[in-house]
Image: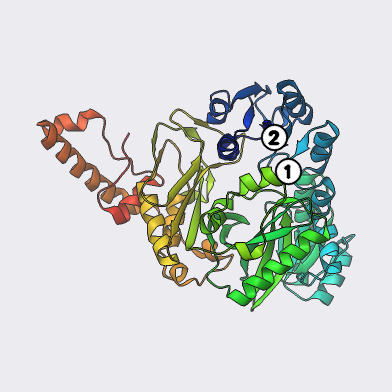
Amino acid sequence: MFKRILIANRGEIALRVIRTAREMGIECVAVYSEVDARALHTRMAHVAVPLGGKLPSESYLDMNKVIQAAKDTGAEAIHPGYGFLSENAEFARRVVDAGLAWIGPPPSAIETMGDKIISRRAMREAGVPCVPGLVDPVADVEEAVKEAEAIGYPIAIKAAAGGGGKGIRVVREPSEMKSAFRAASGEAVASFGDGRLYLERYLDRPRHIEVQVMFDSHGNGVHFFERECSIQRRHQKLVEEAPSSIIDEETRARMGEVAIQAGKAVGYCGAGTVEFLWSGGEFFFLEMNTRLQVEHPITEMITGVDLVREQLRVAAGEELGYGQDALSINGHSIEVRINAENPFNGFLPSTGTLHNLRAPGGPWVRLDTAMYRGLEVGLQYDPMLGKLIVWGANREQAIERMIRAIQEMNVGGVHTGLPAALQVLEHEAFRKGDIDTHFLESLTITSPEKYEALAAVAAAIYRHKLAKRRALAPADAARTGWTARARGETAAYVKRAGHSTSFS
């Protein structure tokens, strides 16, 4: 096993890796930009190396700096986390060439699965069901119109090097093709430096279901069942759960077999996620994420397996040591992403300084975050501040536990998407499991003004109790610093709690 590793990332995923590594007796090296000089991952690691710069391109995306930091500190391996360089085949190759272990899949697997056209071709050859469409890029609008007629509308135009919802447009009739094609191509060039596009049938109102897999370097592979990630906005996930409420045992086994089949087809090793679209009782290959997923904790909660530990074990050359029969599902888990964004204003990014932070607690509640009071939330990095995860004996209990946890959660200083998640969880259709990838977009997120009066009442009740407890006059109690803060997510909690609000 490794004695020391470097984590080429920041935020909650850096802390997540550090925690497991520490339990395994592995020392950790953190790297950080100027913006992250006070970040928690720099304090929890054994060694912290400054990369300089404020932008990702000057720090976490600088391959030379990251690899040199690993060499200078005696690290034996690099864990990329997710985002940044985690799915960069060139970086993985350079890590290996530098004599370090890469805690991830082989560069060749990253390359194959990172290109949507090449991966579709590979999956078809491996017998993996794919959404009807092309396996070659289209040259221009005229060719796109011709091919679309053969595939059938509606059509999804997708970037070959795409990811994160970038470079995607939906075309429902030929007259829309020209503008959509140009927009998708332009976005693809701007986001990935690659304007190649391909076409596939657009599935109306599908469900997004993914399967977690793990392979070792000895030819063994298992899956850890499925996750439902249909609650998303513009292809960005907000609420995830495991297992899916729609998948039966027979389909679960079949999806798992196909996911293993997909991984073996590209010589996979390490943790990965095979993503599917589910529509009309059928599932189709969407893509494979060649890294640990943001939503991996819900899989850990229902299986009892530490996926980061398994990553480190197989990267060090160990065998998995168990087969599929050793794994089973226990209960239900839900994760909600805590993003710095304003759901009452089109989910626009929210910036500021965190002046207050209250974390939920209680049985089977987990908060993966790198937040702390005084944290400056800017626009340099991804808006995700953390993840709230719960486990329940069944789906109904998990939903109620998550609602309660959100009510307890307070992030003061920025808006977050938690009010939107709360309204999803309380929605009758969600409780019935009647959801799809357009569910969140179909909701009208209630304006915070609806909760202003409730927040004011809650604050008044609190001030009254505080005054009574401290034998202060109500007017004096109001000056103790406790004030209603009905902006953003906090006012939404008053909706159910009736007595809980956010205080400075």
Q: Which mark is residue 315?
A: 1
Residue beneath the point at 73% across and 63% down: 260
Residue 35: percent from the left, percent from the top?
Answer: 59, 26
**Residue type highlighted by circle 2:** Phe
The N terminus: image quadrant = top right
Point 13% across, 35% down: residue = 469
Give whichever of 157, 82 is nearer the camera.
82
The quadrant in which the C terminus is found is top left
Contact between labelled residues 1 and 2, with CB atoms less than 8 Å apart: yes
Residue 34 visible in rendering:
no
439 sits left or right of 47 in the view: left
> Dot 2 surroundings within 10 Å: few (below 14), some, or many (20 or more)?
some
Q: Position of residue 379 (x, y in %)?
A: 59, 35
Label 1 secondary element: helix
Gap between marks 2 and 1 measured at Cα: 9 Å
Q: Is residue 253 above or below residue 477?
A: below
| Residue 400 in view | yes
Along the viewing direction, whichever of 364 and 163 lies nearer the viewer = 364
* Residue where numbered disc 2 is placed: 2
Residue type indicated by callout 1: Ala
Please state the horizontal and vertical placement of residue 484, each as a whole percent of the image.
29, 40
Q: Nearer the viewer, residue 362 or 275?
A: 362
Q: Viewed as shown, does residue 204 lie left or right of 120?
A: left
